[in-house]
Structure formats: C-alpha cells, structure tokens
Amino acid sequence: MSVKAVATTFGTYCLADFLSNFIQHPTQKMDYGMFNSLIGRKVDQPFWGTRTQHIIGVAGCLAITDHASQAWFSKRLGKPLCFALSPAHFVAHTFLFIGAGVAAYVLADAAFNPQHANQRAAVAASGLYSTYIGTNTAWFEPYVSPALATVAGPAVAGSWFGSALLPATLAYTTVKGVGWYDWGDSGLNDLEMEINGLLPEKKIVQ
C-alpha cells in the first residue's frame, strides 16, 4: 500500500464527493465552509459541519480502507484483486471498504466535531445506522465500468474516469442519498437552509 496510490485515491474520492453533490442537490447551494468566500457565499463554520469536512474526512478514510482491503484480499487470493477475475471477492471488498471507511468517518466526526459535544453517542449510533443503510446501496459500483464499456467502449471504461471517478461518484450519491436521505432540500445544514431560502420567516411579535 504505497503513499502515492493512497494519495491518488484520496484525490479521486474528494472529487467524487464534490461531484455527487450536484447529482443529489442539482438546484441547491452547498456550504463549503471556508471556501464559501471564494464563491460569494456566507461563511458560518469554516470546517466543522460543512461539505468540506465531509469531502476531506470521508475521502481520507475511504482511501485508507480501500487500499488496506485490496491488500488483504490480494494476499488471500495470492494475486492482485481484480473484478474480472474474482468478481465475488471484489464485491465483498467493495462492501467492506465502503462500510469500514464511512463508519470510521462517522465515529471520528462524533468524537471530535465540537457541534456534537452533548450528543456524541447518539450521533455515532445514528451515523452507523445510516452507514449500514447507505453501504448496502453500493453493490453496483464494480459493475459501472463494465457497463460503461458496452456503451462507450473499453478505452473509456478503462480510463481513470470510467474505472475510478464515475463509479465512486455514483456510489457516493447513493450512499449519502439513501443512507442520510441527502437529496434535494433534505439533508441540508442550517446555513444551506438559509442560503437556499428554506428557513421559515421569523414573525415579529409586537
């Protein structure tokens, strides 16, 4: 498990998470924390509770569990893990690394996010349940590239886009969308509710 390979996967997963937001929330404005000022949006929290925290945190956890799981399965098989040659093992690897990676992020968020100071156990339990639900939707990820090959050809399917970015983006979309019901106007934080005009108007009491 080389540092370069993990770093490359981390970058891919960061981009996949970012792109998945456009699928889940096509018309909504997202809260990217400290980066909001670069796109003319209000900054509430610079990091915690923002899409930036999620992008960096989940990608980091998944990159590590992905390569660790690949190494473990490859050692057991006595050859590099490959979907074409070992489909059942690869599907098992997919469920394992996604579930473990997202769970690791959920537990870290519950433990260190100051916004959860008074409810860490409840946040962890809720997040782990959502992880279980969301991970079960990612069964299709290994099949994205083969399916793409039948439509766009093996060159596109075997490229970084077809074999890594597209499958990851779609998996992020279903895991977050189904596990956390993060679609459209649902799953937004307080600032996102505000900048999308979804907060109820405050009534002035005279």
Image: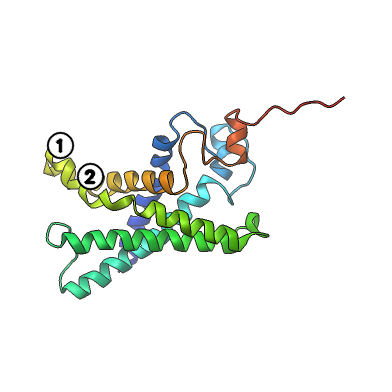
Q: Is residue 147 left or right of residue 132?
A: left
| Nearest to the observer: residue 60 or residue 92 | 92
Q: Is residue 81 left or right of residue 135?
A: left
Secondary structure under the numbered disc 2 in the rendered image: helix
Q: Position of residue 126 (x, y in %)?
A: 53, 56
Q: Is residue 117 left or right of residue 25?
A: right
| Nearest to the observer: residue 180 or residue 31 | 180
Residue indicated by mark 2: 162
Residue 190 lies in quadrant: top right
Q: Amino acid at mark 1?
A: Ala
Tell me what residue is drawn at x 31 percent, y 65 percent. Answer: 67
Question: How many dots with numbers?
Answer: 2
Q: Amino acid at mark 2?
A: Gly
Tell me what residue is drawn at x 15 percent, y 74 percent. Answer: 78
| Nearest to the observer: residue 193 or residue 6 | 193
Secondary structure under the numbered disc 1 in the rendered image: helix
Tell me what residue is drawn at x 51 percent, y 63 percent. Answer: 107
Residue 43 lies in quadrant: top right
Q: Is residue 104 left or right of residue 201?
A: left
**Do the numbered discs 1 and 2 sit on residues whose CB atoms are within 8 Å?**
yes
Would you place residue 108 above or below residue 36 in this image?
Answer: below
Q: Position of residue 39 (x, y in %)?
A: 54, 33
